[in-house]
Amino acid sequence: MQHLPFILPTYRATKSCMIVSTANFGRAHYKNGPANAFRHAYWNYAIAKACEKYSTNTKKIVSWTKDITDWHEFAFPNRELAKVMDCHNNLVGLVTYQEQSFSTSEEAINYFLELAENSVKIKHSNETKNLKYSLVHITASDER
């Protein structure tokens, strides 16, 4: 019950994230490339930012965001490397939320677009260990 106020802002942030991702990448954000990396990182940032309207407790906001997005990653079947990629990019979004301050959502979007442009292609799950501030992907933009 303690996270009940976060449900509606999470829904709204998720919907907004999908709209922003489609506007910037078309359907490419459904693949495992840089566009998908953008979507996951921005999604986490957007959820946390939206929850600020209901709590000033950053620890509680981050905990909720991580719990709900981790649940999403593990509730639906996905290849192991894709799951590692998604969880890593989710964490980049949360780290950004905690360490960066943007005046507008457009600034945040532009930041994540730049991270996506410089996203690192990985082939093994252990490659994410030293990439705390970098987004990762497993396929090129046009691959599946």
Image (cartoon, rainbow, N blue to C red):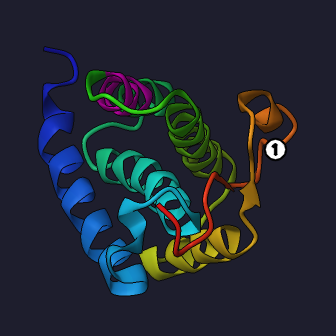
From the image, which quarter does the N terminus lie in?
top left
Furthest residue to the right? Answer: 130
**Where does label 1 land, which residue?**
131
Tell me which segment is drawn in magenta.
Answer: 66-74
How many residues crowd mark 1 within 10 Å: few (<14), some (14–19), many (20+)? some
| Magenta span includes 13 | no
Furthest residue to the front? Answer: 143
Q: Residue 34, percent across and down?
A: 59, 66
* Residue closer to the observer: 3 or 23: 23
User: Residue at 37% of width from left, 31% of height from top?
Assistant: 73
* 24 to 100, vertically: above or below: below
Q: Quadrant of residue 65?
A: top left
User: Residue at 40% of width from left, 45% of height from top?
Assistant: 48
Count all numbered tags in the image, as a single digit.
1
* 142 to 65, vertically: above or below: below
Task: Determine whether, in the image, residue 96 is placed left or right of residue 10.
Answer: right
Q: Quadrant of residue 10?
A: top left
Task: Determine whether, in the image, residue 119 is placed left or right of residue 66.
Answer: right
Task: Determine whether, in the image, residue 48 is placed left or right of residue 10.
Answer: right
* 109 to 74, vertically: above or below: below
User: Residue at 58% of width from left, 46% of height from top?
Assistant: 89
Give the main secondary structure of the magenta stretch. Answer: helix
Q: Residue 123, percent across and down?
A: 74, 42
User: Residue at 33% of width from left, 85% of height from top?
Assistant: 23
Q: Residue 69, percent across and down?
A: 37, 34
Furthest residue to the top? Answer: 1
Q: Amino acid at mark 1?
A: Leu
Q: Quadrant of residue 70?
A: top left
Which type of secondary structure does the marked residue at label 1 adopt? loop
Task: Determine whether, in the image, residue 29 is placed left or right of residue 138.
Answer: left
Q: Residue 62, percent across and down?
A: 47, 32
